[in-house]
Amino acid sequence: MFRIKACLFSYILIALTPFAANSQQSSLEQWMKTEGNIALTRMNQNISPTGAARGVVIASPSRQDPDYYFHWTRDAALVMETFYLPQTFADYTEFSRQTQLVSTLTGLGEPRFNIDGSAYTGPWARPQNDGPALRVLTILRSLRRPQISSATAQATAQTTVQAIVQTDLQYILNYFRTPSFCLWEEVKGDHFYTRLVQMAALKESLEHFDSNWNIPRQTLQTAMTSLQNELARHWRDDKKYFSATLNRIEGAENYKFTDLDTAVILAVLHANLETDEFSVKDDRILATASQLETAFAATYEINAPTYASPYPVAPAIGRYTDDIYFGGNPWYITTAAFAELHYRLSLQLMKNNSYVVTELNLPFLKKALALRGSDSDVAELQSGLNLKTRPQLVKLLQEGLLARGDLFMARLRLHTPVDGSMAEQFARKDGQPVSARDLTWSYASFLSALKSRKALFE
């Protein structure tokens, strides 16, 4: 097995699968390598672009239909979780601190800022309370990375980081019980996504606890437990999936009634918990993913069996089936998320094969096992089976999960133009790019999936 360096300044590597002998798989591997380089380059171009303050992460260069030429707290944190250069990260932290100190209409719940760092005061869905939590996660996790070299710069960065984290944590503690708008900026209520990234931020803060934050450890623990209890209420046992929003107040009038939303999958990936609950191993998450995939397979024309593809692909994935934004299409973000979900679960089974098959996760696991196992192997996968008793079955399942993840990457390949650009969406009827061009989050999601894939070969 060998690895290919994806980019001069990247920590993401593309690994060739040991069982990939056919030209189709090799072609996909080559595309992922090439697209990884393009994604890194284009994402970097959207960070501190000419004319913007240093540390700005524009959502997209698009300035009309739609105008995304702003810095979103959420998007920037997710991008910086994926892309890391010491100076770039230092610029991001300095700009983040500036925006924390700017007077806005909703405090730290303000979702986006002008590219000079000033407050955006036009009409918008506000507040959005996931941004501070994501920023805490990104910044605290960065502490595990190589730090800025000079002692002076390091001390300055440490002071800035401490101020950012303390401010964001206090905001979470003050407002985690308060309704806000969802990550799609459409519905106001209590959201699975917001709650899970808030809980993860509190958990991360406990692991990096600093008495200088002037926040008692017990206060963080109590809030984390409260969020954990509230998250459990999102499970709909009658529907067998997690509901994206509870206590809906406003937004998305006359649609989005099923509340089956890929935001739940994104929440799990962005929270990145190692525990079984609310992680990629949670059988309720896999049940939710299975229902989403089935729903989208029947929704988009490009997912129909009659739609011609030169190679096998998994269904294109959108936000939710009754989406109406730009006509309601699949997104690069959400399709990449399904690839990453499969890669992450494969890695978890590699780390610990003690995993029980249940009625909830069985459909998800069987679909993956069918790509590498025989009919008898698939038949052996039954509810109640602890996989640690079937090591050979675990190996086949790991490979099957990798192969299924690759099918979602192949779907992205099918709808990515030859220049490698990724917009926000691709059209449900013909797969052509739709909405904002060069969406920074699209590139970050693709690279995050590649990073998870790479981890399987380390």
Image: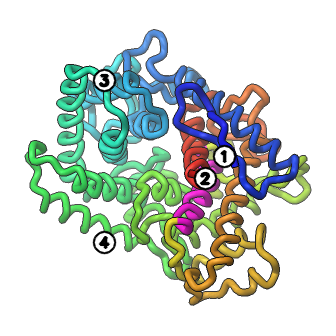
Q: Residues within 10 Å of mark 1 (few under 14, many from 20)?
A: many
Q: Is residue 22 above or below residue 290?
A: above
Q: Residues within 10 Å of mark 4 (few under 14, many from 20)?
A: few
Q: Position of residue 52 (x, y in %)?
A: 42, 14
Q: Does label 3 or label 2 sit earlier along the sequence?
A: 3
Could you tell me how far apart the alpha carbons at marks 3 and 2 are, in whole angstroms?
Answer: 30 Å
Q: Amino acid at mark 4?
A: Asn
Q: Give residue 15's mark.
A: 1
Instruction: Based on the picture, tell me whether residue 243 belongs to the magenta stretch.
Output: no
Q: Which residue is mark 4?
A: 229
Q: Give residue 149's mark.
A: 3
Q: Residue at x 56, y 22 (%)?
A: 61
Q: Position of residue 384 (x, y in %)?
A: 57, 89
For the residues carrying marks 4 and 2, which lies nearer the camera in this image? 2
**Left or right: residue 458 compared with residue 368:** left
How many numbered marks have been drawn onto this rendered protein structure?
A: 4
Could you tell me how far apart the alpha carbons at marks 3 and 1 are, in whole angstroms?
Answer: 30 Å
Q: Residue at x 37, y 64 (%)?
A: 247
Could you tell me how far apart the alpha carbons at marks 4 and 3 are, in whole angstroms?
Answer: 42 Å
Instruction: Based on the picture, tell me whether residue 343 belongs to the magenta stretch.
Output: yes
Q: Residue at x 70, y 49 (%)?
A: 1
Q: Position of residue 242 (x, y in %)?
A: 49, 69
Q: Does label 4 or label 1 sit earlier along the sequence?
A: 1
Q: Does label 4 or label 3 sit earlier along the sequence?
A: 3
Q: Which residue is mark 2?
A: 457
Range of the magenta residues?
333-350
